[in-house]
Amino acid sequence: SASWTGVTRTAPGETLIGELVDGRPSRAWQYGAAGSPVNWTGVEMAFWATDQIPVTSRIDIDAGLRGATTAGSRAGSPAHIPWRAVSPSVQGTWRALPNGRLTLIAGYARYSSRLPLDYLSWGDPNSLSGTVHAWSDRNGDRIPQQGEMGALLARVGPCCAGGRLNTIAPDLHAPRTNEVLLGVHTRIGSHLMLRLGSTDRRQYDLIEPVDAADIRSNYTLTHVSDPGLDMARTEDDQLLPVFERLPASFGTDRYTLQNVANNSARDHGVDLVVERTFDGRWGMLIGGTAHQSEGAGGNRGYRADENDQGVLGEVFTDPNAETNARGRLFFERGYVVKWSGVWRLPHGLQGAAAARYQDGQHFTRVVLAPALDQGLDAIPALPRGRTRFTYAFTLDARIEKQVALGARRATVLLEAYNLLNTNNEVEEDVITGPTFRSPTAVQPPRSIRLGLRYSF
């Protein structure tokens, strides 16, 4: 197979963006006027081969191999990323008992990440550039103006301190994922199926920008007292490290996009599925998973663009972001249970329902450091995932009936989403203080829809 992708990115023009920390002005980001559009391209060539090998009448081996070469670049730019990867896989199936009464499965696979073209921005001198300044919001409107810009804190974009370019490591390569899976499938009776599986995925050499500036000489280390959540007792009290930037080092950062040797992630878990196949009257499917992940999110926070091991962020460029950076990641919800069923009811009615339970999203409590030379900053108080938002639960249901309309038939539908009108919070205030864990977003309310489906 062969594929080509392209991206054209145009600078937004003169732009001034205010950064708020817990709603309070902290820094202002300023980008220059629009320049010529930047065009990045990526080309991938790949081959793969698979084979199913019958060892005996009850044992099969499925083997596969994929090789790929990828190149991302921009004409006339030093930004160039060549990737090559070989991804093998093997899976064995043993039908220990006939008629699907007992089947055992085991497998191993290695995967390589695809190349995001925005990686090229770290070595392209024409990429969007700007500066970060201290921001004193004198008029209190929380909108930065030129007269409110303070000292230069940092440069952002490809051109940094002294005109030196940020760089892409010459040995940058695709992160790899190793996966091991085990499974047991069994049939009980004529309609009941049970499937139990377990997976273990480990990612290595994840990519992040790393600051070449010497943290020890550019920061002073202090501590801020964190009384924890139990204000009356001292068992959870702690001193959190706070790194304050020395003004003499402002604007001296220079970043290299690279594979970070100790930046790995892991996800392992088990899932159980019980299925009662539809026999003309009713059928049901119920499944549950228990997962645990561990890794470093790219940025402070709990959202998809923060607490994810694939996000290019601040974790290796800001020592305050590196504090308690590892923990449970965005995509993992701990325990999840899903159930669905369909029924044929009297009077020509058909009913269906689906329910889902999932643990709350993982987050970490955050402490605001006192005003620092680099602006107001947030310090994660605990490893990610030590705390979670409230669980989410929904029950959806539908009932339908076919009616005759002349020679054709139509279906009347009545559907209810979130039938029980569950309104648990799905996001909360994570800042230590009187509003900690106050809901900031809740589940969508119950909604009912009446519909008519006509086939012709």
Image (cartoon, rainbow, N blue to C red):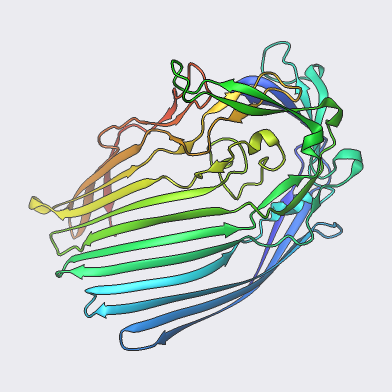
Nearer to the camera, 390 or 6: 390
> Is residue 279 at least partly visible in the picture?
yes
Q: Residue furthest left?
A: 346
Q: Would residue 192 be found to the left or right of residue 305 on screen?
A: left
Q: Identify which residue is drawn at 63% across, 60% down.
A: 175
In percent of width and height, residue 364 lies at 51, 33
In percent of width and height, residue 291 lies at 41, 51
In percent of width and height, residue 360 lies at 40, 38
Question: Compared with residue 294, is residue 455 higher up or lower down, i.e. above or below?
Answer: below
In percent of width and height, residue 185 lies at 28, 69
Q: Quadrant of the C terminus?
A: bottom left
Q: Residue furthest right?
A: 162
Question: Compared with residue 109, is residue 311 higher up or lower down, i.e. above or below?
Answer: above
Q: Would residue 191 be found to the left or right of residue 87 on screen?
A: left
Q: Identify which residue is drawn at 52% across, 22% down.
A: 432
Q: Identify which residue is drawn at 44% across, 39% down.
A: 361
User: Within the image, what quadrant is residue 374 found in?
Assistant: top right
Q: Quadrant of the N terminus?
A: bottom right
Question: Compared with residue 357, is residue 345 higher up or lower down, i.e. above or below?
Answer: below
Q: Would residue 243 be found to the left or right of residue 437 on screen?
A: right
> Is residue 31 at least partly visible in the picture?
no
Figure label count: 0
Q: Residue furthest top?
A: 139
